[in-house]
Image (spheres, coloured by chain):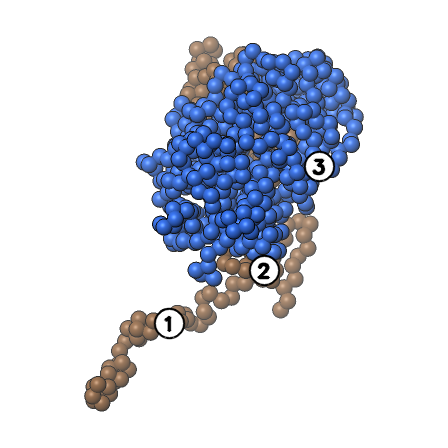
Amino acid sequence: MLRRDFVRAVISAGLAPKPLLAQEAGNPAPSLPAPVPWTLGLNPKTPLPVTEAADVVAETEVRFFTQLQISTLNRLADLLVPPIGGKPGALQAQTPLFLDFLIGNSPEPRRKLYTLGLDWLDSESRKKYSTPFSAIDDASAGALLKPWLRTWMSDHPPTEPHAGFINIAHNDIRNATVNSRAWSDVPTVGAEESTAIGLYWSPIEPEPAGLSAERSPVPAHVRAAPKSGESFPIYPR
Amino acid sequence: MKNEIFDVLIIGSGHSGGMAAKILTEKGIRCLMLNAGPVADVSRDAERKPASELPYRGFKPPGRLQHVFQCNEFNANVWVDEQEVPYTFEPAHPYNWVRVRLFGGRSLFWSRQSFRLSDYEFKARSRDGFGEDWPISHADLAPYYSRVEEIFQVTGALDGPPQMPDGNFILDNAPWSASMQRFISAAKPWNMPVCKQRRASGRDGLASSVNLLLPDAEKTGNLTSIADAVVREITVDKNTGRPNGCHFVDRITRREMAVKARVVVLAAGTLESTRLLLNSKLANSSGVMGHYLMDQIYGAGVVCSVPEARGGKSKGIMGGGAIVPRFRNITANHDKFLRGYAFNVSSSTGAVDPRNFAAYGAELQRNLDEYHGSGFHMTVMGEVLGRYENHVRIDSNKVDAWGIPVLHVETKYTENEFNMAKDAVEVGSAVAEAAGFEVLSKNPEPNPPGYSIHEVGTCRMGDDPKRSVLNKWCQSHDHKNLFVVDGACFASAGWQNPTMTISAISMRAAEYLAREMNRQNL
């Protein structure tokens, strides 16, 4: 290269826009936004905001069952799992609304089991009592339900259509109620069922080498506000 | 290290792979272990929670894992996703393939029931003419069973009849509860031996490959492990025709990679090992690979209540459990089925499941209060016969998330299994009534095949290379540097949980392999 060409090249490079130079640089450090680099600051001592489960403070919108079906399910749930002792019943646990969400997202056979079952229950009630199921008294409802109650072992619910619906729905309503926040908030007495407690596994994904919780020198997170019974964390200033 | 040729490539990290790694590395053999999933760190990945804090209140997340009946919201993330690694079957004959790909595999989650097979299983054909005898007997495997029982810290009593050989146990000398004593007396007319349960205690509450086997292997410095390595196929040396490593794909990045080894040991779990061999088009000169898929019937059983224990009087009456080993077709032939079944028996001091009462509301609660602490349960595990037509093959029309062709499973239970379940429920109910228990519910219908998570066979061992895939050392008849050390090698299923047998067979095969390598035969 002639000397004048070299000088021209150096001058051109000096005048080139910075992004162009960055592309040519191969592996440049990212530019830092002012006034504080955005990736810094968050660290294990950063207090975690305390959040609440949405369904504790908000009402689930009915999106799957029809108005008639949800009315029938409300009555069925209240009948099968009413408030007993200090424990809430299915309605207090918002179980029908939860089932609208659960069943609405389930595979078609389970959706059908519920929709056909609820429709059948209401039509039986209208046929026998000229009243929607949602409005019949306990004795009349019992007369409709009891012929279909069965004992059964797990994974093997009754296979007769109406018995299948009644017994599966009963099991679902009961489990959803026992595992509700409303139920777990009330202390369990005697042989009352307790909310299931277990080891919940998050999605398990690999982590950068050497950063497993066991090997990590980073202390566990602290909460911004402690749950009752926990001491308040002290933040050195 | 990058181009290193390992002595042994082990695919799979559960009980069979972990055992092979332990034995081989302790003998100075350099092993590479590949596992298709990540390492689970319980302190990072799991947290104890009430169901009320979970979005689905503990229910199985809808639409996921439809064929994993064991799935709930707590454990939904530990199972292999059926969308990610699908398999196919005829809708009329569903198969429940229950898989874990975390490092350690299903050894992280198992019932710990720890039984030996007996010669009633190893030499079953000689007794009833059905199927094939194994090329080994209990005497061949007994020394290995003893060492496995020591590693797994198996508790039990030396009370087994010939069809349930005793072992190297931490002795259980606890007395039977009153309800169990009544059950034992009532069972006598049926010649039902009632024995103490046999269960692996493990160490620190876990009896897994990750805490009992892999640490020993890692201590030697001879084990290298890679997680998230989804093996696509076994590779073959073009000159010798022998397996020489594998291609794998990184589960997350999809990066395609390859490794080399002198010997390949498959321990990916029965059906994954077979799938890999079928996809690699290896070791199937017999044509029986994929055939003779077996497991055990589960789901049938009887739930009872002990009347005297009701109303809060369970103390001293209730508690404990037992195993009733197979008692059918031992001293007399049954006319409705071959082989037999076992009962798992438990006397509970806890709640009785509400499904045992045809009642609701206040009436149901009165029953639950009254019956609390009086539940007595019998569940059935019965042998499924090995039939050629019960098989798996590659479904060339479907691939998994990494483009690997999936398995098609074609299997169903026959009258033998259904009659066995029916007999079990009839006998269980009769014994319960003879003991003075109230039968609350019973079910004679088995769950779909696969539910027991005891799938075995499809690469069965045998002396005849035309009728079996492996020899008695779990070594391929076709390729002497290829071994399959998981449940795929079983020649019959038995009624027993297979973990002890898989572990003992893997130990025996690994010792043979080490000897052969030292003799320069491999």
Question: On the rendered structure, is B33 left or right of B218?
Answer: left
Instruction: Say which residue appears at 49% left-offset and 42% top-offset.
Output: B483
The tint of chain B in the picture is blue
For label 3, the crowd category at 10 Å Cα-Cα, with few meaning under 14, some 14 to 19 and many 20 or more, is: some
Tags 3 and 1 both on a single chain: no
Task: Tell me where residue B22 appears, x and y as whole percent.
Answer: 59, 49
Q: Nearer the viewer, mark 3 or mark 1?
A: 3
Q: Which corner quadrant holds the N terminus of chain A?
A: bottom left
User: Hey, which residue is sitting farthest top in the picture?
Assistant: A128
Task: Tell me where residue B193 appears, x and y as whole percent.
Answer: 70, 21
Type of amino acid at the residue the image marks with label 2: Ser
Q: Is residue A53 above or below residue A193?
A: below
Classify mark 1: helix, strand or loop. Answer: loop
Q: Nearer the viewer, mark 3 or mark 2?
A: 3
**Badge number at residue B168:** 3
- Dot 3 falls on which chain? B
Instruction: Say which residue appears at 40% left-offset and 32% top-offset.
Output: B287
Q: Is residue B396 visible?
A: yes
